[in-house]
Image (spheres, coloured by chain):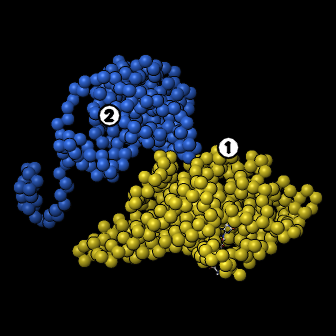
């Protein structure tokens, strides 16, 4: 089974978030980047597990500048067989989906896996756009995936239950919690990653259809106000005058 | 008290030493840190409390690649450089000195001498099994009456056909009661120190456990007792004679300790820093009082100095240039630093600092062993003294 896993970098969860360039751009100064957990823990690990079961090849792909090679190497250390970097800033989901589709369309992947979202922009858009560009079936938020021949059985958690669907490969599936269990790379994997191929390809031309107007940080959380349980009038006053929710 | 808390440890790198490390080093560090958070932190207070060794971690340590990370991969090691080995030791000891000791002994004191001084056959026979954790090894140098002065050892071997007959006893041996093999140092009939691999089950060989330790409680320690043990000649390490055999292993392990101790210090500092922001007294967080700031500021200063010392030592070791005396200086400085940091961190935690709600007392008690084993604090000072004056103050 020939599997493509799309991986992305995201700021570490403890990073301090700020913006620059007239609040149009994320300020990455001093920010530590990590491999997006949904890509790493679930999509990539499940891809490796499937490969271990039925054989094949796992390619980790990232759209990004050379600064993302650290996270690519981590994917290789965890167990991807090879990596591809499309040398472009992933400015928006459509641009990114287009680039991945352009690369993937002639490669005959049986399965394309990616995280359900990145933990920075939380867009959850890429999978659907990619499937559309490639004209492939798509299931999002998979919490379980099994492959039997050319049939993929996918489970996703929905409000009050689970939904199980069957589809034929090739297909695109986005990974949610539960799809696999995080694998910590070991020293052997880290050393082997050095000799695995990393191919850099140049992006195709694409006119971005989205323009970023600006970002703002959410208002700082205010401190908790304690209200005496016998003073309901004060609670109502605070809710209507200060919180302005009544 | 309940001791299962999430490990909230955060990265501390005041002098951007990360910039001096390669991507592989950082990957290795993050991997081991994740492993420790997942496998060690949730259980270590409990095991330490009960003075029990979490044996199941041997397999995990092997899987992550913590045994002999700088031994070539074809012999069951990780094939990494000395800097990576040091970084891994820091992360393990951030979890617990006993867990780091498991890895130090297996990698530096058992796999290393077999790799360095063993025959090809011995290497093939033992190293892959040690690297994978299938075999646990121990290292027997110290004797009941010969600690700081191992050259005086009385454990001995006498030739008998194609075997040697081994007699004597070793004391304070990490992992000995559970070990499958022991690398033992003994004198031959000419009084020359030789290394040999003694296997569990050889008649006359026993390894009773030492109980009652208030330090390194999650690591098992014991004796090695040899009564006319017949050891085939093919088990003698052919390529070394004399005290330099065990001492070169110790250099390796001490190098790891110089890095490891920083981990224990970092964990104490990390906990104290967090506590100083959360704990309110006199209407202010502790961290706002000058005396607390002095403690925290001095801790991170000393940690940073130790990190730089370790980094430079690592660079020298990568080029094969780190001298035993340089390693002694780093081991001595960094362990004493860690103990001092633990004591200050303990004070910042107030009464809570003496409980197993926080890792401080465990690290502090562990570090008392680390200060003593692999050459005591004072012995390392004498090594530096001898190195700079050319005069021997040992005897
Ligand atoms: C938990 C634990 C695990 C250990 N694991 C191992 C192991 O796996 N393998 C192994 O071989 N050993 C191991 N050891 C032994 C350890 O290396 C020795 O304890 C150490 O070398 C000191 O020896 P000693 O305890 O006999 O102390 P001693 O040598 O008796 O020293 C006592 C004190 O006298 C001081 N002193 C000694 N000589 C001098 C001198 N010339 N000048 C000034 N001061 C001096 C020392 O610094 C020390 O403070 C372990 C020890 C412990 C506690």
Left or right, A1 with respect to A101, comes to right
Which secondary structure, mark 2?
Answer: loop
* Residue B384 spot, x, y in % from top left: 60, 73
Does any portion of residue B270 appear in the rendered image? yes
* Residue A22 or residue A10, whichever sits in front: A22
State ligand 1's quadrant. bottom right
Q: Which chain is displayed in blue in the rendered image?
A: A
- Return the x and y of residue B348 as percentages of the image width and height: 37, 74
| Chain letter belonging to callout 2 | A
Q: Which mark is residue A89?
A: 2
Q: Nearer the viewer, mark 2 or mark 1?
A: 2
Residue at x 17% of width, y 64% of height: A226
Say if labels 2 and 1 share a chain: no
Residue B146 in which image quadrant? bottom right
Kindly check if marks 2 and 1 are in contact, taking CB atoms under 8 A apart as contact. Answer: no
Supply the letter of whichever chain is yellow.
B
Q: Is mark 1 on a helix, strand or loop?
A: helix
Q: How many numbered marks have been drawn onto this rendered protein structure?
A: 2
Which residue is tagged 1? B74
């Amino acid at each position: 089974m020939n599997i493509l896993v799309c991986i992305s970098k995201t700021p570490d969860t403890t990073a301090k978030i700020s913006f620059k360039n007239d609040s149009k751009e994320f300020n990455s100064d001093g920010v530590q980047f990590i491999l997006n957990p949904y890509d790493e823990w679930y999509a990539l690990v499940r891809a490796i597990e499937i490969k271990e079961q039925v054989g094949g090849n796992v390619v980790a792909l990232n759209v990004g500048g050379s600064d993302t090679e650290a996270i690519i190497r981590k994917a290789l250390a965890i167990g991807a067989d090879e990596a591809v970097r499309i040398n472009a800033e992933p400015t928006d989901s459509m641009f990114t989906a287009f680039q991945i589709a352009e690369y993937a369309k002639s490669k005959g992947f049986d399965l394309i896996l990616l995280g359900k979202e990145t933990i920075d922009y939380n867009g959850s858009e890429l999978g659907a756009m990619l499937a559309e560009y490639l004209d492939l079936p798509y299931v999002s938020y998979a919490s379980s995936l099994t492959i039997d021949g050319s049939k993929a059985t996918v489970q996703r958690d929905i409000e009050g239950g689970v939904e199980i669907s069957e589809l034929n490969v090739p297909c695109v599936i986005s990974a949610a919690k539960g799809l696999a269990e995080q694998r910590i790379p070991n020293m052997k994997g880290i050393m082997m990653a050095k000799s695995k191929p990393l191919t850099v390809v140049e992006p195709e031309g694409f006119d971005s259809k989205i323009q970023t107007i600006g970002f703002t940080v959410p208002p700082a959380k205010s401190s908790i106000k304690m209200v005496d349980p016998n003073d309901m009038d004060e609670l109502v006053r605070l809710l209507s005058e200060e919180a302005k929710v009544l | 008290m309940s001791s299962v808390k999430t490990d909230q440890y955060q990265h501390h790198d005041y002098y951007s030493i990360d910039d001096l490390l390669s991507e592989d080093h950082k990957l290795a560090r993050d991997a081991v840190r994740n492993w420790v958070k997942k496998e060690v932190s949730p259980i270590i207070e409990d095991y330490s409390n009960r003075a029990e060794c979490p044996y199941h971690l041997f397999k995990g340590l092997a899987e992550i690649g913590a045994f002999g990370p700088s031994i070539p991969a074809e012999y069951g090691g990780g094939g990494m450089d000395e800097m990576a080995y040091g970084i891994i030791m820091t992360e393990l000891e951030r979890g617990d000195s006993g867990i780091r000791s498991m890895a130090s002994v297996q990698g530096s004191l058992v796999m290393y001498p077999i790799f360095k001084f063993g025959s090809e056959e011995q290497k093939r026979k033992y190293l892959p099994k040690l690297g994978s954790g299938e075999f646990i090894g121990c290292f027997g140098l110290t004797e009941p009456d010969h600690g700081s002065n191992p050259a005086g050892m009385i454990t001995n071997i006498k030739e008998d056909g194609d075997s040697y007959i081994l007699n004597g006893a070793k004391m304070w041996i990490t992992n000995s009661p559970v070990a499958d093999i022991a690398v033992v140092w003994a004198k031959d009939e000419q009084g020359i120190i030789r290394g040999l691999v003694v296997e569990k089950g050889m008649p006359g060989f026993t390894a009773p456990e030492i109980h009652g330790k208030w330090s390194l409680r999650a690591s098992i320690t014991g004796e090695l007792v040899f009564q006319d043990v017949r050891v085939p000649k093919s088990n003698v390490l052919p390529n070394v004679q004399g005290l330099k055999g065990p001492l070169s292993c110790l250099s390796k392990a001490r190098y790891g300790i110089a890095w490891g101790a920083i981990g224990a210090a970092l964990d104490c500092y990390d906990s104290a820093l967090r506590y100083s922001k959360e704990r309110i007294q006199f209407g202010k967080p502790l961290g706002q009082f000058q005396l607390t700031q002095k403690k925290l500021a001095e801790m991170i200063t000393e940690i940073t100095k130790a990190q730089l010392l370790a980094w430079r030592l690592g660079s020298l070791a990568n080029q094969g240039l780190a001298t035993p005396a340089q390693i002694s200086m780093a081991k001595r400085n960094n362990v004493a630093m860690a103990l001092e940091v633990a004591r200050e961190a303990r004070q910042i935690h107030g009464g809570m600092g003496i409980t197993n709600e926080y890792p401080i007392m465990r690290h502090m008690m562990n570090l008392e062993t680390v200060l003593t084993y692999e050459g005591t604090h004072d012995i390392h000072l004498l090594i530096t003294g001898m190195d700079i004056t050319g005069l021997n103050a040992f005897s």
